[in-house]
């Protein structure tokens, strides 16, 4: 048994401040989750831009026009009368790429 002089200091037995720590951890977790959701949405928007850029580049190159995307780059590959355009665009979570196939005009 412990006597009064052997008890732990009152600062270690108190719950004072625990609510502040829990609130700080909860709010920081919410901020991180919201940031990840926003980054995922921006990556999805970049993918949609890559799909549009690949389609526009394939159509333009197939009819003999030049196409320069607003961001990223487009690689062209022609085989068997079909043109494949692959657009790569930087995104918050890595890079996204999309391909489009279009027949070559004579």
Image (cartoon, rainbow, N blue to C red):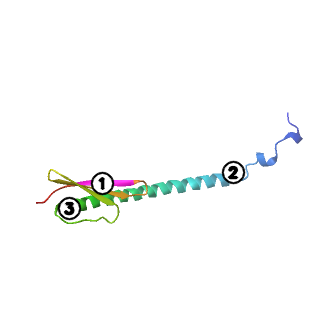
- The numbered mark, 1 or 3, whose residue comes first in the sequence reads 3
On residue 98, which mark appears? 1
Residue 74 placement (x, y as % from top left): 29, 59
Q: Nearer the viewer, residue 63 or 32?
A: 63
On residue 35, which mark appears? none
Q: CA distance from mark 1 to mark 3?
A: 16 Å
**Left or right for 23, reference 51:** right
39 drawn magenta = no
- The numbered mark, 3 or 2, whose residue comes first in the sequence reads 2
On residue 61, which mark appears? 3
The magenta segment: 95-100
Residue at 22% x, 59% y: name it. 58
Q: CA distance from mark 2 to mark 1?
A: 50 Å
Residue at 58% x, 55% y: name it. 28
- The numbered mark, 2 or 1, whose residue comes first in the sequence reads 2
98 drawn magenta = yes
Q: CA distance from mark 3 to mark 2?
A: 64 Å
Q: Nearer the viewer, residue 30 or 68?
A: 68
Q: Nearer the viewer, residue 51 or 75?
A: 75
- Under tag 1, what secondary structure? strand
Residue 30 occupies quadrant = bottom right
For disc 2, the marked residue is: 18
Residue 3 placement (x, y as % from top left): 88, 38
How busy is the neighbourhood of tag 2: few (under 14 within 10 Å), some, or many (20 plus)?
A: few
Residue 63 placement (x, y as % from top left): 16, 63
């Amino acid at each position: 048994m412990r006597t009064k002089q052997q008890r732990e200091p009152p600062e270690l037995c108190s719950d004072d401040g625990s609510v502040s720590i829990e609130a700080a951890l909860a709010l920081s977790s919410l901020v991180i989750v919201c940031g990840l959701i926003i980054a995922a949405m921006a990556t999805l928007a970049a993918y949609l831009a890559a799909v549009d850029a690949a389609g526009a580049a394939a159509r333009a190159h197939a009819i003999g026009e030049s196409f320069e995307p607003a961001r990223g780059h487009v690689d062209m590959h022609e085989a068997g009368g079909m043109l494949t355009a692959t657009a790569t665009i930087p995104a918050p979570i890595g890079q996204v790429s999309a391909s489009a196939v279009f027949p070559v005009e004579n």
